[in-house]
Image: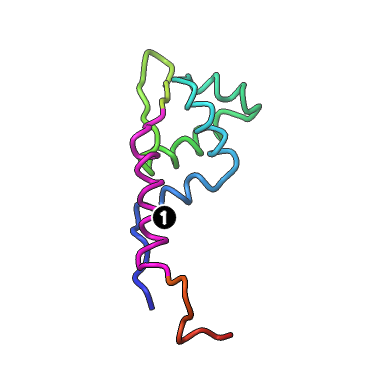
């Protein structure tokens, strides 16, 4: 049995795997947004948007800043770029054999 992928990689992938959270990341890739803007873009209630933003924040993919009564969110690009490399490193941990494999089923 192989060792499990790092928990940070899996946590970030889980955070991105929900369609609402993926859409939030796509909107935030265009720049910072207030939670009320994100509610309007997604046509969802504030509680649902805040729930999904919290998951993305806990995964380290976004940051928030309180300004007056409003909270503004922005994307953390570096973790997303790193995620791609870490994911590939986890998938291709050992060299890929391109020739006959002795323990192959077929």
- Above/below status of 85 relative to 97: above
Q: Quadrant of the N terminus?
A: bottom left
For the point 39% across and 62% down, the residue is 92
For the point 37% across and 42% down, the residue is 58
For the point 51% across and 84% down, the residue is 104
- The main secondary structure of the magenta stretch is helix
In the image, 66 versus 97, the foreground residue is 97
> In the current view of this chain or complex, which residue is farthest to the right?
43
For the point 56% across and 28% down, the residue is 46
Q: Which residue is mark 1?
A: 10
Secondary element type, mark 1: helix
- Above/below status of 68 relative to 91: above
In the image, 39 versus 59, the foreground residue is 59
- Residue extent of the magenta highlight: 75-96
| Residue 53 position within the rendered picture, expressed as x and y whole percent measured from the top left | 47, 35
Can residue 89 be found in the magenta stretch?
yes
């Amino acid at each position: 049995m192989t060792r499990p992928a790092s928990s940070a990689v899996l946590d970030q992938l889980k955070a991105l795997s929900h369609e609402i959270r993926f859409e939030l990341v796509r909107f935030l890739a265009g720049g910072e947004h207030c939670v009320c803007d994100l509610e309007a873009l997604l046509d969802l209630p504030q509680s649902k948007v805040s729930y999904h933003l919290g998951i993305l924040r806990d995964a380290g993919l976004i940051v928030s800043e309180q300004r007056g009564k409003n909270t503004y969110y922005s994307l953390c690009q570096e973790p997303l770029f790193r995620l791609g490399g870490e994911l590939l490193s986890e998938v291709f941990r050992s060299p890929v054999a391109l020739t006959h494999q002795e323990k192959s089923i077929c």
